[in-house]
Every structure is written in C-alpha cells, then in structure tokens.
Image: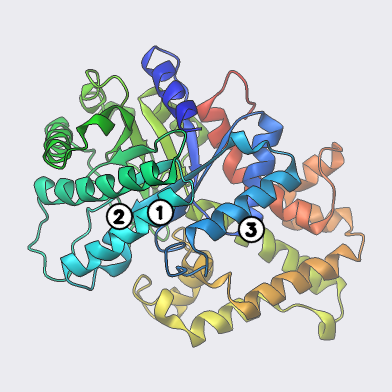
Amino acid sequence: MSLKLLDMVRAHKSGTPVGIAAVCSAHPLVLRAAIAQAVADGTPVLIEATSNQVDQFGGYTGMRPADFRELCLAIAAEEGLPADRLILGGDHLGPNRWQSEPAEQAMAKALDLVAAYVAAGYEKIHLDCSMACADDTLPLSDEVVAERAARMLAVAERTAAEAGLAHRPVYVIGTEVPVPGGAHEELAELTATSPEAARATIAAHRSAFAEHGVLDAWDRVIALVVQPGVEFDHLRVIPYDRSKTVALRTVLDDEPTMLFEAHSTDYQLPEHLRELVEDHWFVIKVGPGLTFNLREGLFALSHIEDELVPAERRSGLRAVIESTMVADPGRWSAYYEGDESAQRIQRRYSYSDRLRYYLPDAAVEAAQERLLDNLAQIEIPLPLISQYLPAQYDRVLRGELASDPRALVMDRVKDALRPYAFACNPQEVGA
C-alpha cells in the first residue's frame, strides 16, 4: 500500500487536492470506528501507532509493533475492510521514549524501534529525532536531527531488504515537530514554519541521507512535518489561518514526491481541515481528539446507566477512571497544572486527553465492559439518547444507527473522523 500513498501524492501534485487522515490511536473501539468509517466511505484507512503507545518493549499499551498490526488486521477482517486498504504507520519513531537517557543510548533503542516497525510490515515511517536527549546541547540543530534520522532510515531500508518486502516504506521527515499529544502549556498564538526553516530542514536531510548512502530513498519521502499554525492545549484550540502559510506552501514545488504533514489537527473545524489539504498538507493527523470523543461517549453512557441500572450493578466508570488517575498520577501530573479543582477538570475534560493513557488499565477496561454489557441488556429510551448523545439520537431516528451502546459510542468516535473524510476527499465522501 505504500505505492497507494505515492500515487495519492502524485495525484495531489498534479492538481487533485486529495489527502489522508492519520488515525493515531491504539484503543480497540477507536480502531474499530475508524475501520468501519473507511468501509462506509470506500476509502483506505491509515492507522499509526505512536512510539510511546507501541514499541519493542510494549509501550504503554503492552503491544509491540507486530501485536498492533495483528490487532488492526483482525478488526479489519471483522468489519469487512480488505487488508489492502489498511495502511499502517509508525508515528514519532525516534528517541522520544528515552529522552532522559544519553543520546547514543537512546538512539540505539530508537534504531531497534524502527527495525521492529519495518519488520512487522508498517509502510509509513515518521523519522522523528527532533527531541533532545539527556546529554544534548540545546537547541538541536537541523544537522543533528537529520543525521540521526538518516541513521534510522538506513536501518529501516536494511530491515526492509532483509525481510524481502515487496515495497519499501515511505517516510516522513521534519525538525519542527509538535509534541506528541498536544501542547503542555497554555497557548496564545502559533507562528507557522518559515519557508527558510523548511528549506534548511530539507537540505540537511538530503545531505545526511547522502552521507549515509541512502539518498536513493529520497523519492519515498512523501511528507515534511512543518507547523501550519494549528495546535490545542488543555482548554483552547488554535484554528488554521491559511493567510499565514502563503509563502510556506511554495517550498515543496520542486519536490515531485513530497508534500506536508500536519500534526495536532484535532478539533479543527471541517472547513479548516479542508483548507489544510488544499494548501498541501497531505497527511493530517488526529489522535487525542478520537479518545476525547470516545470518553464523551462513554461518559454519556455512564450517565444513562445511572438512570436505568440499580446502584449495586452499575459500572461506576467515571469514578473508576478518576480514582485510577489519582492513585497513579505519573501519566498526567507533568501536564496538568493549577489547584486541585483545575486539575480535576483537566483530568476529565482536557483537549490533550491524558485520560487516554489510563483506558488500557485493567480496572478501567473492566468498568467499561460492565457499562456496555449493562446497557446492552436494556432498551435505552430514546429521550435519554437525545439528552446525552443528541447527534446519535438523530441518526437513530433516521434508521442509520442502532441504539446498541457499542454502536452509539463508536458513532461518537466517528463524529471526530467525519470531518477528516470530508477534508481529504470531498468529491466522494459526505461530511
């Protein structure tokens, strides 16, 4: 399918403003929703595992790259998506997980990481060495970032050759890479990457690829990560303003197989996503926005459960999540500031959605399944669906959606995906 991505890039370069959404989540319900949406739309689906979610040691999900691939393939088979329409990618592959270690120690693990992804058949590889390690001098130069990316590329190419892959992976590069999962601090305004900075990044990577003997992979570098001026923090979204990227958009005119990739596009309005694709951001990534909608759907169902199920049988999902996060603050405390009241709101409702790190916990998973099982045994009254899931209520009334709790929560996740389907291929897919 890497050829499919190259074909789409060439089509875009020829004047057809197509794009592709990158689904950056490892939650099974999110994956199922994304795959079901692709089946309905008749499109491929690009699913990317992030380096902190899935790595050679298991990441925070407990899955290695081969495990995640098998999970996606199994869901695709169950949902009726042909395997050749499933594209897998690795996001932020580099020393991200090991920034507290010396650079060479972290890079040794990063090289093993990219080898594990390529050997497992991932076709789109984001080479991200933009983060500093423990003994690095700040700020990292383009040359240092590019040299590390070239080392990773060499390992990826060698692994692909040894595995006998029919098609080599395609790659994404860049030095102005947003922090995975959204900004840590409150934001006021963002400045788009300057054309000069983008050109310097391209030149540094081209030079480093040549020095490491992998310049023949340059025509499979399909995207450059640059900042289009979009981001979100805990409580605010900065929308895309195309008037601020006019000069930047011309940077790749002489690169026949390279477009832009946009990170942190979660929560953008559909028209802004469409403008991003028209302005040559070929890959637009969505991650926390998906589990944000999943959390909204699950919380809505838990309120419905409170109305319908006796107290002794309820899942207590909201309370289980809160107690789990408070008992184990290590995965959110570095992100959420303020007093206890402010932290409580951010734990539950922040756009950056650090709650997603806790969804795989055994107690949370058990509460989620109990919630869904409890409501599956009841015919949920339509007025309660209207109260807590109004968009889904409309679809239930039109006969487009079952009132089954799993169908309802998956459709809430699809609400985060539908704008991307419109933005990437409006001629074929409805909003």
Question: Residue at label 2?
Answer: 187
Q: Nearer the viewer, residue 220 or 34?
A: 220
- For residue 28, the mark is 3
Q: Mark 2 touching mark 1, by CB under 8 A?
A: yes
Examine the rendering and report whether any part of residue 126 can be seen. yes
Q: Is residue 62 left or right of residue 220?
A: right
Q: Is residue 153 left or right of residue 401?
A: left
Residues packed near mark 2 inside 10 Å, few (<14), some (14 to 19) or many (20 plus): some
Sequence-earlier tag: 3 or 1: 3
Looking at the image, the residue that sits furthest to the left is 137
Question: Residue at label 1?
Answer: 236
Q: Residue at x 46, y 58 (%)?
A: 351
Sequence-earlier tag: 2 or 1: 2
Amino acid beneath label 1: Arg
Amino acid beneath label 2: Leu
Measured as percent of width and height from the top left, residue 12 is found at 41, 19
Q: Is residue 170 left or right of residue 205?
A: right
Q: Residue at x 11, y 51 (%)?
A: 144
Q: Nearer the viewer, residue 112 or 226?
A: 112
Note whether 251 is above or below 403 in the view shown.
above
